[in-house]
Image (cartoon, helix red, strand yellow):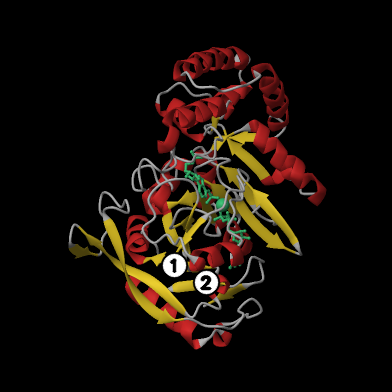
Amino acid sequence: MAVDLLLGLQWGDEGKGKIVDVLTKNYDIIARFQGGPNAGHTLEFDGIKHVLHTIPSGIFHKNALNIVGNGVVIDPVIFKKELDNLEQFKIDIKSKLVISRKAHLILPTHRLLDAASEAAKGKAKIGSTLKGIGPTYMDKTGRNGMRIGDLELDNWEKKYRALANKHEAMIAFYNVDIQYDLKELEDEFMKAVKALKQLTFIDSEEYLYQAQKAGKKILAEGAQGSLLDVDFGTYPFVTSSNTTAAGACTGLGVSPGQIGRVFGIFKAYATRVGSGPFPTELFDEDGATMGRVGNEFGATTGRPRRCGWIDLVALKYAVQINGVTDLMMMKADVLSGFKNIKICTAYTYKGETISHLPYNIESENVTPIYTEMKGWAKDLTKMSSEEELPENLMDYIKFLEAELEVPIKIVSVGPDRTQTIHR
Ligand code: GDP
Ligand code: IMO
Ligand code: MG
């Protein structure tokens, strides 16, 4: 049985959490493959809104097993908070949530290093979520990291101490004003590790191999988006993992040949949180309207998200890099009421018109070229079938499908699980 992938095609926050929740009924296993608590995946049903950071978005379904894969970085403190939030929902966590032994641990000092690094960058800062993501992946690739499996060893605290001491020296080296009480942070960390150790740690690549052989259906859940990928995103304003399809292979240990459908999610417009280039960003009333109607505030940090028109140059690039087979368009309802809708189909770059993503997309290098389409006024949020969708929205959908050469299989018209139109 193949492993299907679900990933964001823009700068994150496309609505991955909602769609994983919608699709979970078709799967036996939901497996997160990269990122960590920098992610904030929102699910809404029965009038309740849930935000997950590390725990896969299939957790509310009785029949699915949720795996935190080896490519994920885990902060026990945030993980414990997520578990505490779930307690009231009477989920049998012990049987429904397992963690890869090869997933790396975010130490309190990783978070401090993240803060020190950003402070030292000043105006050039990445706009990190400050969850310790960069420093933890640096320790992973630098071969200094601590893994979940280490917590099963008798001497893990010794290993912890050596790494934390090294981090303290590195923080001092940055020579920035970072105030912290490490003792307090470590007390919280040790308590959280205890809670984490109540869960089952597994060799997830072996588990997934056997599950596939047994015919289980597996959905891999991505975090962030393709334009935040460490290789293919708007470097250096990216996260520190491969958010694209290849990341699922390394982040779960599944081979490329085992990948089935690749579900690519995008918003009907575009948003970005943190620093970095965003060619179609709006600084006018239209952008403010998208932010207000779309409630565009980060699910992890609460920061306002920057908003702009859809960028097909960037979206095509993401479709290409990921080999997307099915598209899902989110937040179509947010565009209701715009008289005209703009679609960026090409850039002017060094005096020429180009339709591929160049090395550098800073605003001084690229100017978006737009096609305009007529908007629609109707409220979409109560619609439940394609037949009800306004004609101008259908024209928009068909235009995007023709440009991207991939069918749009889901149109989302509101945050709730039920506000989902399958085509
Ligand atoms: P993720 O990180 O990709 O899971 O996305 P986030 O949860 O960070 O951000 C998506 C936001 O949009 C959340 O607040 C969702 O509840 C909300 N959302 C998802 N789909 C829709 C939709 O179709 N319409 C509207 N209005 N909101 C949506
Ligand atoms: P989900 O999974 C949107 C952004 C940060 C920052 C950059 C680097 O909810 O879509 P990091 O903390 O990784 O060092 O931050 O990446 N970023 C996200 N933006 N959604 C996310 O996750 C993000 N995770 C990180 O804002 O610009
Ligand atoms: Mg998010």
In the image, taking residue 34 as reference, residue 17 lies left or right, namely right
The local secondary structure at tag 2 comes to: strand
Instruction: Tell me the kind of residue under disc 2.
Output: Ile
* Residue 323: % across, % down: 36, 59
The quadrant of the picture showing ligand 1 is bottom right
Please name the residue shown 57% across and 52% down the image: 304
**Position above or below: 198 against 61:** above
Q: Residue furthest left?
A: 351
* Residue 134: % across, % down: 47, 33
Q: Which mark is residue 326?
A: 1
Please name the residue shown 22% across and 63% down the image: 354
Q: From mark 1 to mark 2, how far is it between C-alphas? A: 9 Å
The local secondary structure at tag 1 comes to: strand
Picture quarter containing residue 352? bottom left
Please name the residue shown 39% across and 74% down the image: 400
In the image, taking residue 272 as reference, residue 323 lies left or right, namely left
**Position above or below: 115 against 234:** above
Picture quarter containing residue 42? bottom right
* Camera-nearest residue between 182 and 210: 182
Tags 1 and 2 in contact by the CB under 8 Å rule? yes
Q: Which mark is residue 410?
A: 2
Characterize the local packing of mark 2: few (<14), some (14-19) or many (20 or more) Cα atoms within 10 angstroms: some
* Residue 399: % across, % down: 38, 78
Comes first in the chain, label 1 or label 2? 1
Does any portion of residue 102 appear in the rendered image? yes
